[in-house]
Image (cartoon, coloured by chain):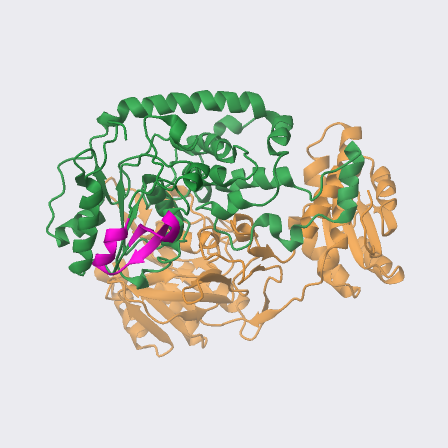
Chain colours: A orange, B green
Amino acid sequence: MTMAGNCPRTGVFVCGCGPNIAGQLDIESVAAAAAGLDGVVLAETWGLLCSPDGKRHLADRIRESGLERVVIAACSPRDHEKTFQDVCAGAGLNPFMMEMANIREHVAWVTRDRTEATAKAVRIVTGAVLRSAALRPLEQTGIVAEPAVAVVGAGIAGMAAALILAEEGRRVTVLDRSTEAGGAAVLAGNPLAVELRDRFLAEPGITFLPGTEPAEVPGFFGNFLLRPRSATGELFPIVRVGAILLATGCVRDAEGSCHPAEGFAVLAEMLRVETGDGGFPSRRHAFLDPVSTPVSGVLVAGGAGGPCSIGSAVMSAGAAAGTILSTLVAGREMETEPRTSVISEILCAGCRTCMTVCAYAAVSYDAERGICTVNAVLCKGCGNCAAACPSGAIRAKHYMPDQIRRQVAGVLA
Amino acid sequence: MSPIMPAFPAHSGVLELAGAALAAGAVRGVLVPMRAPGGSRAWSLVTDPAMLDRADPLPPAMTVHGSRALASFARSPEGGTLLAILRPCEARAAVELARLGQIDLANVILMTMDCPGSVPLDTHRADREAAPDPADPSTLRSLCAQCQAFAGEGDLCATGPSGSLHALTAGGRAFLEKLGIEPADGPPPMERYAVLAAERGRRAAEDRILLRSEYGGLAGLVRLFSGCIGCRTCRTVCPICYCRLCFIDMKDRRTPAEELLARSGRNGAVRLPPDTLLFHVGRMAHMSLSCVSCGLCEDACPADIPVGRMMSMVSEGTTGLFGYRAGSAPGEPLPLNTFLKDELHEFED
């Protein structure tokens, strides 16, 4: 398969992944097939490319051979895309000039026949090489992390965490649907809870917004844009926070089983936190990290994570506050995604289909111009909008039509 | 005109209602076809009740789709309340365009009358007054002869020989209330059209069997579209096609010369300009869920390709998959934007 145009100097590295790939297909044949493709100046195999030796070798090759594109035939980009991007950057190559061909999950682990697996890997690598020629460099940018924290729920756990955070100098905004702080423990007349409530209300670093809940929370760890809303629907100014602590408690129904507080499901969906057992949020690890949800920067304390005693609620509040203090560091630069979507102002027909498929609230409608626009800081580059746009007005920067077409042509060649 | 759909006293009744609404300030304008110089009709935004004398609410031919005329005005609610007097397929296209974010119906009252169908543009060019006869398919455009949804759409409909006025939505009821008009009781009685609708249903089914046997499969499609002159008129007149630039015309999907040579290499030759079939199949993929079978594309095709009947047939299949009907309830979500975990199992391995 040939393609017109100047072919950049391309290096292809086929990783054996120990026996994971090398045991299932003939990686030497894959490298040999890649060596015959236009622009490929170097095609070789390596035992374990993500090992320190492998990475050093890759960096050396990029420098020695003046590679302009790198194709890594190895595992899923979910595992090591970042690893190899960093190697490229270290060797002076823009990290987005590296393309991964997943011949482990997509081939070695699913295709039994060795000959078929090898042929399939050759097609996938050919597609990756052809696509890589059309890659364009993208610039990594960042924004400074916001050290402020939002706490949802002013019960015992929320108040305890807010106090710890505020005493460490963090600005804390606390929302609660109720017009009073204190939650169940204060209602039950617990004297320690009452004392905690009084300290909470007196703490100058804490802004308490009684009778409010989050209306929307676009953003990510280090940069959430929380908009509080009152029960009557009145919207408050957006609060920028780096982390969000869910301390919404739980309720016991007539049969005696516990559920998250009313409205928790909506809140969880807003934050893209999955819920499992009885509607409670899933956690990074039940024992090792019970206060962190799988979504970076969203934590859980007290009954919001499941029924618990007042003592456990206060302890989990301490753990959550500690996690925030140690991971959300003031002044630290957070990387934003450079592979964002862009909307052509000329082509957009303003149908707003993109807004219905964006999971990151990154697209908004500009009524004055009748078009949609992407907030590049919020966009995670998933490409949903580009695929859904009926007018073809949206382009995913790293998956342009020519890049996709070349990859398809390569796979079918 | 045949006794199936007698000459419509509602014609004058509907215009009277429009005039009264304008005079009472209940609407700022009325969208209706008007007689234009040379005997043609043109969609007009009427603000002076006196001008309604020249209106012709069900003109013999369909030249521009009413939903398209509406979309040029009602992009936002700012224009104020408008009464649009449309054919049923035009009202459905208006609702579909609202779902696609291209029309704002907040301030629009859609009013329909029972549609006798349209004569082909060729007939209309020869005789501006040649009228369609709903009972005689030879006087109708091919898709009108298959149409079973020719009455009872919109917010309001005037139906039957007496032109009884029915409110089909809350908006329609509120509008009549404002004018102090009592709508007819109950839903519009459609039984009177059952025989005609069934006959047309049979005609459509027979025609589709024929189309499938003639043009089924890739080879059949190539034969069907080989006469296409690439004028893209089907796309231009389509009320639903709303993209500002069609996918087929985008610069970044232009086929490179090297690729054309590769395609030529496979069969020894390749047709240029390329992608005739891609254009038509692409249009089916993009539009068939929203097609209201208005027939404009086919009537306008200078190469006499049955593009409308093909699209309508494909549309029957795709909408059937989702239990969807283009232009029915305005609030209903678009099937391609709606993720359901439990659907389309028939396409699983």
Question: Where, quadrant-wise, is the N terminus of chain A in this rendering?
Answer: top right
Residue A324: x, y in percent? 49, 65
Residue B95: x, y in percent? 35, 46
Residue B113: x, y in percent? 26, 40
Question: Where, quadrant-wise, is the C terminus of chain A in this rendering?
Answer: top right
Frontmost residue, A201 versus A10: A10
The answer to whether A218 appears left or right of A15 in the picture is left
How many numbered circles does the render carry? 0
Frontmost residue, B325 versus B248: B248
Q: In this view, does B240 lie above or below A177?
A: above
Q: Residue A305 lies in magenta, yes or no?
A: no
Q: What stretch is highlighted in magenta?
A: B31-55
The answer to whether B193 appears left or right of A116 in the picture is left
Q: In this view, does B84 lie above or below A160?
A: above
Task: Note whether residue A333 is visible.
Answer: no
Residue lying furthest bottom in this view?
A: A204
The answer to whether B137 appears left or right of A146 in the picture is left
Frontmost residue, A62 versus B57: B57
Task: Note whether residue B124 is visible.
Answer: yes
Q: In which quarter of the image is residue A179?
A: bottom left
Residue at image position (51%, 21%) is B210
Q: Residue B34 lies in magenta, yes or no?
A: yes
Residue at image position (56%, 58%) is A380
Residue B288: x, y in percent? 48, 38
Q: In which quarter of the image is residue B27?
A: bottom left
Residue at image position (36%, 72%) is A237
Frontmost residue, A336 versus B34: B34
